[in-house]
Amino acid sequence: MAFRLTPHERGFYPLFTRAAENIASAADLLAKLVAAEPAARIALARQVKESENAGDTLTHEIMVKLNSTFVTPFDREDIYRLASSLDDVLDLIEEAADRIVLYRLGALPPGVAEQVSVLQQAAGATAEAMPRLEKPTKLQEYWIHVNSLEDDADAVYRSLLGDLLAPPDDAAPTDILDVLKLKEVVETLEEAADAFETVANTVESIAVKEA
């Protein structure tokens, strides 16, 4: 652990914890939205938006504290990157929920639920890791797990994309506009998985510097 002569501000840790817990709640809401009937999705999308607004507030609090703190618990660039990547995850979850409702999509392919399940797992792992961020060198299992989940997300994404763009010969015909709408949703969920990996990689970077 790096030696410090000056005490550092510890108030960042609870903010990161709250941000991660908020993301986990949003991921659970997204899972409910994906499984719901179209008519029930509007209310759930509104709740996801509320989570996104709460996340924006937390990100703002972190940035204000960053700009007003002389001695930070770890590198300023890592605090900024961690806050930004957590915010990116939440933005993408909200974007996926919004598009599902905006595009008035009907029943979604099972692969979409699989994508969201991976996001829920990554969100849960991140929410468990953030309270232990003060000792990042002990979080190796966390970033390895999230990187593995991102591999799982890639596999689901490729399979879904293949089914959308090159459906099996015995598949029912699909309207091209519906395919394009679904493709956007699927791509947004894949970007969310990538953003979770960025969070994990940032924690790993912090751990390397603190070792």
Image: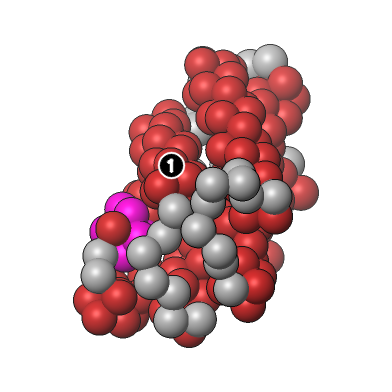
Q: Position of residue 82 (x, y in %)?
A: 63, 48
Residue range corresponding to the magenta coloring: 28-34
Query: Which corner quadrant holds the N terminus?
Result: top right
Residue that appears at 41% across and 47% down? 110
Asked whether 121 or 161 is in front, the reply is: 161
Q: Position of residue 136 (x, y in %)?
A: 56, 25
Secondary structure beneath dot 1 equals: helix
Give the residue displayed 47% in from the left and 45% down from the top: 111
Instruction: Left or right? Give the position of 174 relative to 44.
Output: right
Could you say which is closer to the camera, residue 30 or residue 79? 30
How many numbered circles does the render carry? Answer: 1
- Residue that mark 1 sits on: 114
Q: Hey, which quadrant is residue 210 in on the image?
A: top right
Amino acid found under the numbered disc labelled 1: Glu
The one nearer the camera, 205 or 87, is: 87
Inspect the magenta stretch and tell me whether residue 29 lies in it.
yes
Q: Main secondary structure of the magenta part?
A: helix
Q: Quadrant of residue 107?
A: bottom left
With respect to residue 126, does 210 lie above or below?
above
Q: Residue at x 58, y 57 (%)?
A: 186
Q: Is 18 left or right of 78, judged from the image as shown? A: left
Residue drawn at x 38%, y 71% is 106
Residue 25 pos. (x, y %): 31, 55
On whether residue 27 falls in the magenta region, the answer is no
Q: Nearer the viewer, residue 60 or 4?
A: 60
- Quarter containing the C terminus: top right
Q: Horizontal placement of 208 versus 47: left or right? A: right
- Name above or below for residue 143 compared with residue 39: above
Residue 60 showing in the rendered view: no
